[in-house]
């Protein structure tokens, strides 16, 4: 295959996924965050991110069979924003994608391929809400199926969502969140010092009088009060950021 790619002057497309090598102890290494690094005993190189280590492993393997000159393109890479495992969170997905974009655009390359800017494709554009299988399989996107961003990795133009809407954000419950989870969110927020009087009887947001509407109000109040960080809308993975005003 590498001979064919060299003969046709085509790149070798590889799919490095630090996500699949994640462990809590190696989180910073996988997410391009400051860390002590991992030393490769064969080369003596200390890698400070798993992405570079994966690319250099591919390059080393190709070079060992005489094809180190074949160009490499990142066919896909990404991070799941929701799943059953500790690796998944909106914050981790945003950190990985943001830091990845900054890294590949820097032109620094890798220790064995310095001064390279790798053409890189993100997986994926949209969450696939109809895809079967584990939760992670449906949550790799930058956007929800309704076009609202799952998170901003620094690529939304001037903070404006596709379609021209303003960049103001709200926090609302996910559509599949259970009543029990939403009630727990209400109890938590109302015990944290956030004013919940508007959803009490006679309050301006008491109607519609149902748990989902009340949870939407208090979750958003918490999100706005605490600084509008994406992690303030996590709520044990029952909250989601939206660019559509939920009050209407």
Image: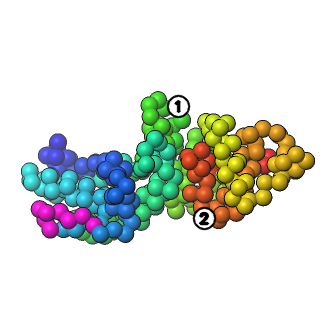
Q: Residue 167, how many percent across, how many down? A: 66, 59
Give the foreground label among 2 and 1: 1
Residue with the most extreme front position: 191
Q: Residue 207, how many percent across, how many down? A: 85, 42
- Which portion, as a residue range, is magenta? 37-44
Q: Is residue 112 magenta?
A: no
Residue found 20% across the figure and 47% down from its top:
5
Residue with the most extreme right position: 202
Residue denoted by label 1: 130
Residue denoted by label 2: 158
Question: Which SS class for mark 1?
Answer: loop
Colour scheme: rainbow
Q: Residue 236, how many percent across, how many down? A: 56, 48
Residue found 24% across the figure and 64% down from its top:
38
Labelled pair 2, 1 in contact (Cβ < 8 Å):
no
Question: Which SS class for mark 2?
Answer: helix
Q: Alpha carbon of mark 2 to alpha carbon of mark 1: how far? A: 31 Å
Residue found 25% across the figure and 55% down from its top:
54
Residue found 91% across the figure and 47% down from its top:
202
Viewed as shown, does residue 204 lie left or right of 23?
right
Say whether residue 40 is visible.
Answer: yes
Viewed as shown, does residue 9 lie left or right of 182?
left
Q: Quadrant of residue 53?
A: bottom left
């Amino acid at each position: 295959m590498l001979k064919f790619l060299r003969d046709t002057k085509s790149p070798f497309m590889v799919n490095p996924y630090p996500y699949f090598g994640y462990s809590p102890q190696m989180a910073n290494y996988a997410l391009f965050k400051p860390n002590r690094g991992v030393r490769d005993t064969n080369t003596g190189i200390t890698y400070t991110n798993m992405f570079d280590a994966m690319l250099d492993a591919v390059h080393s393997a190709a070079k060992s069979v005489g094809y180190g000159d074949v160009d490499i393109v990142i066919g896909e890479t990404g991070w799941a924003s929701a799943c059953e495992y500790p690796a998944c969170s909106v914050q981790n997905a945003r950190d990985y994608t943001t830091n990845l974009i900054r890294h590949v655009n820097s032109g620094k390359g890798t220790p064995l391929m310095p001064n390279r800017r790798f053409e890189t494709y993100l997986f994926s554009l949209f969450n696939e809400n109809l895809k079967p299988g584990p939760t992670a399989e449906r949550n790799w996107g930058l956007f929800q199926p309704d076009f609202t961003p799952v998170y901003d990795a620094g690529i939304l133009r001037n903070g404006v969502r596709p379609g021209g809407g303003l960049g103001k954000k709200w926090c609302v419950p996910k559509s599949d969140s259970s009543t029990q989870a939403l009630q727990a969110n209400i109890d938590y927020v109302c015990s944290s010092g956030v004013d919940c009087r508007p959803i009490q009887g006679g309050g301006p947001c008491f109607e519609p009088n149902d748990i989902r509407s009340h949870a939407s109000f208090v979750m958003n109040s918490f999100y706005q009060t605490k600084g509008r960080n994406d992690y303030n809308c996590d709520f044990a993975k029952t909250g989601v950021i939206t660019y559509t005003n939920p009050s209407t």
